Amino acid sequence: MLTRFFALTLLVAGMAGSSLPAQTASLSIDVDKPTAKVSPMLYGLMTEEINFSYDGGLYGELVRDRAVRQGWGALEHWAVVARGDAEAQISVDGKVGPSAALPRSIKLSATRASEAAPAGLENDGYWGMAARPESTYSGSFYAKSDNAVAVTVSLANDQTGAVAGSATVTGVTGDWKQYTFTLKTGSAPATANNHLILTVAKPATVWFTLISLFPPTYHDRPNGNRIDLMEKLAAMHPHFLRLPGGNYLEGDHIPDRYQWKKTIGPWVDRPTHPSPWSYRSSDGMGLLEFLEWTEDLKIEPVMAVYAGYSMAQEHVDAGEKLEPYVQDALDEIEYVTGGPETKWGAERVKDGHPAAFPLHYVEIGNEDEFDKSGSYDGRYAQFYKAIKQRYPALQVIATTAVKSVKPDVLDEHFYMPAEESFAGAHHYDKTDRNGPKIFVGEWATREGTPTPNLEAALGDAAWMTDLERNSDLVVMASYAPLFVNVNPGGMQWATDLIGYDALTSYGSPSYWAQVMFGSYLGTEVVPATLSDEGPRLFASATRDETRRKLYVKVVNATSEARTVRLVLAGVEKIRPEAKLITLSGKTPNATNSIGDPAAIVPVEQRIRVDGPKFERRFAAYSINVVEMDY
Ligand code: AHR
């Protein structure tokens, strides 16, 4: 009888979901026996235009479809304005535009308009436009008119019509010209329910394009990024930005690929391009803006170059036909790293950035295992040879296994349900060290939508203990996708790290797991061995010998609080005051959202550590970092 009861207790206590007390696990950490250096580039960011990540997301532009673009029949997001007895129409003029890249415009035909009854056009933004109090907005538009007119620009409330800020641009006349203006808002409270209106007060035909309005941006960069989102990225303590994609690099078809040369220079020379994620990219976030983004975060680009494969199974064979693409990649590297004496370095200087950017990693394509023609081996080898010849120090990343040359680094992607993340939490412990270094260029635990829930964060944290333990091999890792605009129609990928609308943003539980792992990371890996671990308990440890800090991560993905006995070997003393940072929730489904942005956030507390052996209770469904001084 007793035996049966005992066996049953053990069985139930080991199961997630049990209400019986779980055993004490022990975690042995050999603080004085580092096994590897932590890769200095371990955690970074992966990005692409998906889920309105840039347009309607990070890129500060408030006006949606600011340029009249190829493929536009009817006007979208633009509507005519005719107050009182004004009479006006707007239409796409496919033959009148300011440049070869933008040969179209919006034609406003105001046949009756006056001060009392102005006529014009309005834009509804990306699900609204944020107007904040006491702020300065920078605007511009390209226009020409058959009759010299003044154009009044106002940021107005959708419900009340109240104007948050307004400016008038005078002397809009004959030839295409860019006009600039500034709007200052008053004390009205912040709201996203706004639209932008441009009006004239006398009859005229006016052609417009590139109508733009920017709020204050991160580091006050012109053409820059949203402050709240950049602050969230900075808090992750990333080391690199993988750009520009993802599928966004490849495009569905070869002409739709990311053509970097069409994304630099003045906006008026950027034709915009179709992205594979169902909407067209403004290319306001062009190559230089990507690089400035890395500069603002003090991180470096990991730059993927188009490698002759697009997703509709279109490819360019290695050899002569691929040469222009290889040359394009070499030009791109020169644009990023070249001095003013080089052709493309000089182009970057002309674009306003004299200093070269740091670059150590270049990736050849994206997910080329999907190219069923088998052409990647030859394509990779051709890029590899050309890049190494000109830039021998660059590390050249392959996106799938190749045979003809040994890649410096291999990019592996993992999108997993939580069970797979838990099961895979020792994946790299077993990986051969004679192969290429690993870049986990895209990965995520996919539970919850539009942003992952706590279950996903637990899976992520379990998975990151593996990345950390094996960071001699895994030199870089980046979660994907990074961003989602949570408005209806904003999302193309169901689990995304950071959500936002026009006004506010929030980090998912998975975001906070990234913040915790990125913020508390030593320079060396030390062995951390769990005994009696049972299912869903994971750990890793790193130390910083210079700062004498030890960071222990414990992930308890079970429904019970777990007591863990930490046994630190090889340290003479431990400072009794330590820090414990915990991310936890009542259920695995618990999550954050735009309406409840801080339901699951890390909580920090001071704890007492009584010598190198101590017990600590880790909450159910929790991710923990213990920071100790030794
Ligand atoms: O992250 C979303 C997509 O997943 C990326 O664009 C692609 O590389 C992967 O298949």
Image: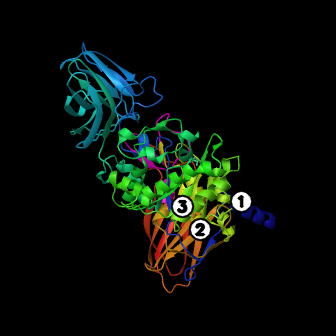
Q: Amino acid at mark 3?
A: Ile
| Residue that appears at 28% across and 31% down | 176
Q: Which residue position is annotated with label 2?
A: 539
Position of residue 591 relative to residue 41, above or below, is above
Depth order, front residue of 297/510: 297
Residue 579 on image: x %, y %: 45, 70
Coloured how? rainbow
C-alpha distance separating marks 3 and 2: 10 Å
Q: Which residue position is annotated with label 1?
A: 12
Position of residue 66 relative to residue 45, above or below, is above
Q: Which of the two marks, 3 or 1, is nearer to us in this view? A: 3
Determine if the magenta segment contains residue 11.
no
For label 1, the crowd category at 10 Å Cα-Cα, with few meaning under 14, some 14 to 19 and many 20 or more, is: some
Mark 2 falls on what kind of element? strand
Q: Of marks 3 and 1, which one's residue comes earlier in the chain?
A: 1
Position of residue 427 relative to residue 123, above or below, is below
Q: Which of the two marks, 2 or 1, is nearer to us in this view? A: 2
Q: Which residue extends farthest bottom? A: 572
| Label 2 beta carbon within 8 A of ligand 1 | no
Q: Quadrant of residue 339?
A: bottom left
Q: Amino acid at mark 1?
A: Val
Mark 3 falls on what kind of element? strand
Mark identifier at residue 623:
3
**Image quarter in which the N terminus is found:** bottom right
Determine if the magenta segment contains residue 496.
yes
Part of the protein shown in magenta: 485-514
